[in-house]
Amino acid sequence: MIAEQMLIQQEVKEVKAVSQTDCLFCKIVNGEIPSEVVYQDDQLLAIKDIDPVAPIHLLLMPKIHLDSLNDIGPEHLELIGRLQLLAAQLAASLGIAEQGFRLVNNCGSWGGQAIFHLHYHLLGGKEMGWPPE
Ligand code: ZN
């Protein structure tokens, strides 16, 4: 009985993980909403932020829907690793690697997350302070 329930929950989670119809970033991934694509492959998408807060401001996201970093598990290790590698590669190709850049994940409402589809902000082209506020 418990095993059956776990199986059902797992199936629901998998369906949910592919795409959400009411998610802005899923619509961007699916091409329903246009975006300035900087990079994409079968798993990842990088686009320009429409409201940049730095000279270079990209959004990097997995194509599958995950609400936030709170939803990742060991099965996402490669995906998240590839996402961080992509950030470093994009920083290098954009010429901001040497001066430095910032890779930010806002998780949940107190973390400042506005769109609940896991994404990272790649910010560069200006010197940034610490702490963030
Ligand atoms: Zn989504």
Image: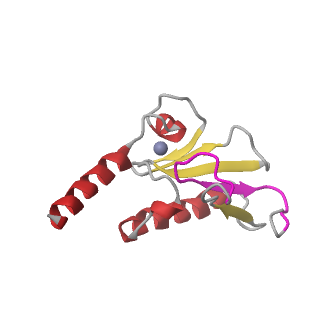
Quick one: 101 or 130, which is closer to the camera? 130
Quick one: 23 or 33, which is closer to the camera? 23
Residue 3 in percent (x, y) is at 17, 66
Residue 31 in percent (x, y) is at 47, 31
Up the image or down, 117 lies above or below 129; here it is: above
Residue 6 in percent (x, y) is at 23, 62
**Residue at image location 69% in from the left, 55% down from the top:** 112
**Residue at image location 85% in from the left, 62% down from the top:** 127
Residue 9 in percent (x, y) is at 27, 56
Would residue 7 be counted in the magenta stretch?
A: no
Q: Which residues are magenta?
A: 111-129
Would residue 123 be counted in the magenta stretch?
A: yes
Determine whether, in the image, residue 5 is placed left or right of residue 56: left
Residue 128, by quadrant, is: bottom right
Coloration of the structure image: secondary structure
Q: How many marks?
A: 0
**Residue at image location 36% in from the left, 47% down from the top:** 16
Quarter in which the N terminus is drawn:
bottom left
